[in-house]
Image (cartoon, rainbow, N blue to C red):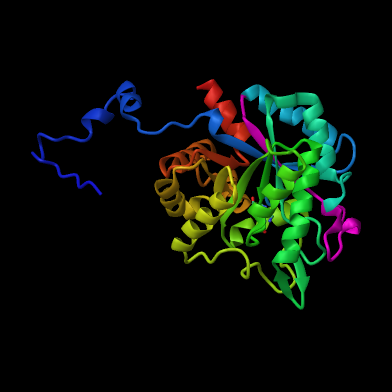
């Protein structure tokens, strides 16, 4: 680490000189946020011309596929590079095995096909790989005697990845935190001649309370059977472990890695970027969005300014991009400036 020492000291060194004028502040700014850094997570529901508010996420709605196709078109026109799809699954379709996850006609696959038919390669489509939107117990994998089993879960997760890729998904994003899932997904995709499909691994995903609003948004069980996801997602106390997770995912074939949640884990983003120099993403999760937007709604903070400041923080920490529910609002603001 370089040590910086003010050699001549005050008053010759005046840090405020460079900050005096707006042009100068622009000139010395070290990081930039652009629309190219944004991935927009969206929630999809069955039906036609249907929207539903997510009460814990102001201004976020679940959209039926027809409306989602239009919304993704707007995102594309703003220059947003990719969207990440999350399905709200009809509770009647859930079971212990999460078998709807491997139905090629499921909601998320139909949404991928519709978006790709309308927009082609002008915008990327990402899909989550995990069972929690599909299981009645709310876990990301299969339960046996109250424990989420690894290897059997990996098998079904790889099938889930396969049907999503076959539907036209560009980026497979395993968020389940099972061991070895990236390798298995890569193998299954390659065998199916889907070697061009990218993998963005949720590599350092923490067992976090900041996912609360998301679980409302997708209708997954807020408290999965067994209480929490701590036997597979990471402990918030750890960051060396995050580096091991990232190293494994890269070795198994991940093209991009992710840290999640975002703002409470910026130190992890920085460590990952410094250590590996691979495309590194952070997920500004539902709880972060709810926290900032909720406070702004009450007039306690300036909503636009905290939005932009929070996104810039990810860039400063070394992220190459950010999954954010603010993507569209931020892209509009960036365009108008
Ligand atoms: C599914 C998944 C979750 C999120 C993304 N994919 C929830 C969880 O693991 O419980 C959270 C996203 C957010 O909070 O915005 N495994």
Q: Report which quarter residue 60 is drawn in.
A: top right
Query: Which residue appears at 72% of the width and 69% of the height?
Result: 149
Span shown in magenta: 79-101
Q: Report which quarter residue 169 is drawn in.
A: top right
Residue 278 at x, y percent in the picture: 49, 42
- Depth check: give the residue in front, 61 or 195: 195
Q: Report which quarter residue 293 is drawn in.
A: top right
Name the side, left or right, on which 319 lies relative to 50: left
- Depth check: give the residue in front, 158 or 117: 158
Residue 47 at x, y percent in the picture: 90, 40
Q: In the rendered structure, does residue 187 fall within the stretch colored magenta?
A: no
Residue 264 at x, y percent in the picture: 49, 55
Q: In the rendered structure, does residue 86 fall within the stretch colored magenta?
A: yes
The residue most toward the left is: 8
Query: Which residue appears at 21% of the width and 35% of the height?
Result: 15
Query: Which residue appears at 57% of the width and 35% of the height?
Result: 38
């Amino acid at each position: 680490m370089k040590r910086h020492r003010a050699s001549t000291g005050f008053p010759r060194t005046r840090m405020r000189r460079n900050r005096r004028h707006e042009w100068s502040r622009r000139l010395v700014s070290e990081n930039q946020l652009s629309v190219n850094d944004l991935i927009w997570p969206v929630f999809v529901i069955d039906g036609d011309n249907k929207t539903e508010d997510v009460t814990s996420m102001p201004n976020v709605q679940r959209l039926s596929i027809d409306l989602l196709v239009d919304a993704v078109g707007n995102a594309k026109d703003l220059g947003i590079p990719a969207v990440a799809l999350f399905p709200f699954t009809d509770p009647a379709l859930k079971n212990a095995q999460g078998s709807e996850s491997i139905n090629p006609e499921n909601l998320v696959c139909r949404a991928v096909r519709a978006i790709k038919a309308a927009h082609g390669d002008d915008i990327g489509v990402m899909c989550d790989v995990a069972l929690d939107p599909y299981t009645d117990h709310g876990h990301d994998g299969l339960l046996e005697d109250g424990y989420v089993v690894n290897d059997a879960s990996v098998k079904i997760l790889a099938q889930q990845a396969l049907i999503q890729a076959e539907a036209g998904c560009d980026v497979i994003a395993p968020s389940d935190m099972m061991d070895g899932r990236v390798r298995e997904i890569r193998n299954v995709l390659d065998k199916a001649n889907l070697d061009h499909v990218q993998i963005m691994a949720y590599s350092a995903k923490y067992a976090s309370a900041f996912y609360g609003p998301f679980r409302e948004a997708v209708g997954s069980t807020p408290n999965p059977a067994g209480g929490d996801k701590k036997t597979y997602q990471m402990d918030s106390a750890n960051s060396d472990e995050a580096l091991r997770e990232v190293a494994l995912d890269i070795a198994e074939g991940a093209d991009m890695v992710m840290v999640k949640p975002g703002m409470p884990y910026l130190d992890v983003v920085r460590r990952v970027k410094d250590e590996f120099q691979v495309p590194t993403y952070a997920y500004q999760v539902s709880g972060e969005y709810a926290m900032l937007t909720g406070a702004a709604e009450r007039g306690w903070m300036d909503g636009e300014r905290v939005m932009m400041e929070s996104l810039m923080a990810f860039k400063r920490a070394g992220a190459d991009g950010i999954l954010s529910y603010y993507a569209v609002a931020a892209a509009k603001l960036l365009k108008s400036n």
